């Protein structure tokens, strides 16, 4: 049985800043062998010896074997250390952890994927998974929003998929950075503004979403208004991930552990434990 506490040495194949403060990292096992099996929505622990470790959602798809891809935001000592590494340097990796999206249930159905800001990172894995297996899913729609066009992640990748899937972007403010204005004009607002009309088969559409805490309540409400069944709504609560195995206790919410029972939760999980999505006391949840 593998020791879940042990890390393995992995080599950085590529690391680059894709928008200010956000670094794309591609890795492979240093000792050869393959990338362990994982599913979209799961996460790995990445560490730098002598500095620390943190959970990071995987952004690559298992349909593209050989490498593991992540996106890391430079916000602290560990992520600053990772940002300073170069191709050929080594880091520690252990995982995968968590449950991932319910791929078997999703097969044969349409997908509506909603992301706010950094929330596109775990959903990129699911987007590429569905694109690589076109006969196994129906229509795929990606609704992605950010504060400004300069904060959109993987925008070239997403626009490159526009022949295969429906991509809709929206930002709160246009700065003129990148191809956003050329492609989408002066459309501004919130990602939830893109939801009306995005669901064409409500009983055959799964929703998967990831974003800031305030995002979930309004996104779910808008999806249900489109007729989507509550049993088909899933959300990644990756911000609550910690040690990966539920031992440190920091990921605990009520009787659930995000690292073990999540980070993918469904509508009924959030309804029964609204603190999962950081609802404020007395704030009404959607019915």
Image (tube, rainbow, N blue to C red):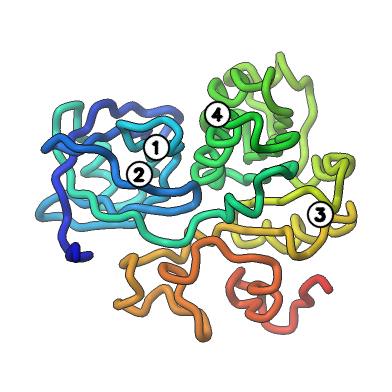
Q: Are marks 2 and 1 in contact (CB under 8 Å)?
A: yes
The correct choice, above or below, for 15 with respect to 115 in the image is: above
Q: Are marks 3 and 1 in contact (CB under 8 Å)?
A: no
Observer-nearest of 94 and 118:
94
Quarter of the image with the C terminus in it: bottom right
First in sequence: mark 4 or mark 3? 4
- Label 2: state its secondary structure: loop
Mark 3 lies on residue: 223
Q: Are marks 4 and 3 in contact (CB under 8 Å)?
A: no
First in sequence: mark 3 or mark 2? 2
Mark 1 lies on residue: 21
Observer-nearest of 54 and 99:
99
- Label 4: state its secondary structure: helix
C-alpha distance separating marks 4 and 3: 26 Å
How would you rate the neighbour count of disc 1 (Cα within 10 Å): few for under 14, some for 14-19, many for 20 or more?
Answer: some
How would you rate the neighbour count of disc 2 (Cα within 10 Å): few for under 14, some for 14-19, many for 20 or more?
Answer: some
The image quadrant that residue 129 belongs to is top right
Mark 4 lies on residue: 132
First in sequence: mark 1 or mark 4? 1
First in sequence: mark 2 or mark 4? 2
- Residue 26 screen position, x and y as percent: 31, 32
Circle 2 or circle 4, nearest the eye? 4
């Amino acid at each position: 049985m593998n020791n879940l506490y042990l890390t393995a040495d992995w080599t950085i194949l590529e690391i680059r800043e894709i928008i200010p403060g956000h670094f794309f990292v591609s890795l492979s096992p240093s000792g050869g062998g393959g990338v362990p099996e994982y599913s979209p929505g799961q996460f790995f622990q990445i560490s730098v010896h002598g500095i620390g470790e943190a959970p990071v959602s995987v952004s690559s798809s298992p349909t593209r074997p050989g490498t593991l891809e992540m996106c890391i935001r430079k916000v602290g000592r560990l992520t600053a250390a990772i940002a300073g590494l170069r191709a050929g340097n080594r880091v520690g990796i252990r995982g995968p952890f968590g449950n991932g999206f319910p791929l078997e249930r999703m097969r044969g159905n349409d997908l509506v994927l909603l992301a706010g800001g950094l929330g596109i990172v775990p959903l990129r894995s699911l987007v590429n998974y569905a694109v690589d297996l076109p006969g196994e899913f129906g229509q795929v729609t990606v609704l992605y929003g950010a504060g400004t066009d300069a904060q959109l992640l993987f925008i070239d990748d997403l626009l490159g998929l526009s022949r295969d899937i429906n991509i809709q972007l929206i930002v709160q403010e246009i700065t003129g950075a990148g191809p956003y204005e050329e492609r989408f004009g002066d459309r501004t607002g919130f990602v939830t503004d893109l939801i009306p009309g995005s669901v064409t088969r409500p009983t055959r559409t799964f929703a998967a979403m990831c974003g800031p805490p305030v995002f979930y309540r309004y996104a779910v409400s808008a999806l249900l208004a489109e007729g989507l069944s509550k049993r088909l709504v899933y959300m990644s609560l990756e911000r609550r991930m910690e040690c990966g195995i539920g031992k440190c206790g920091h990921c605990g919410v009520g009787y659930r552990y995000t690292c073990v029972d999540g980070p993918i939760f469904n509508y009924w999980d959030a309804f029964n434990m609204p603190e999962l999505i950081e609802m404020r006391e007395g704030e009404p949840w959607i019915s």
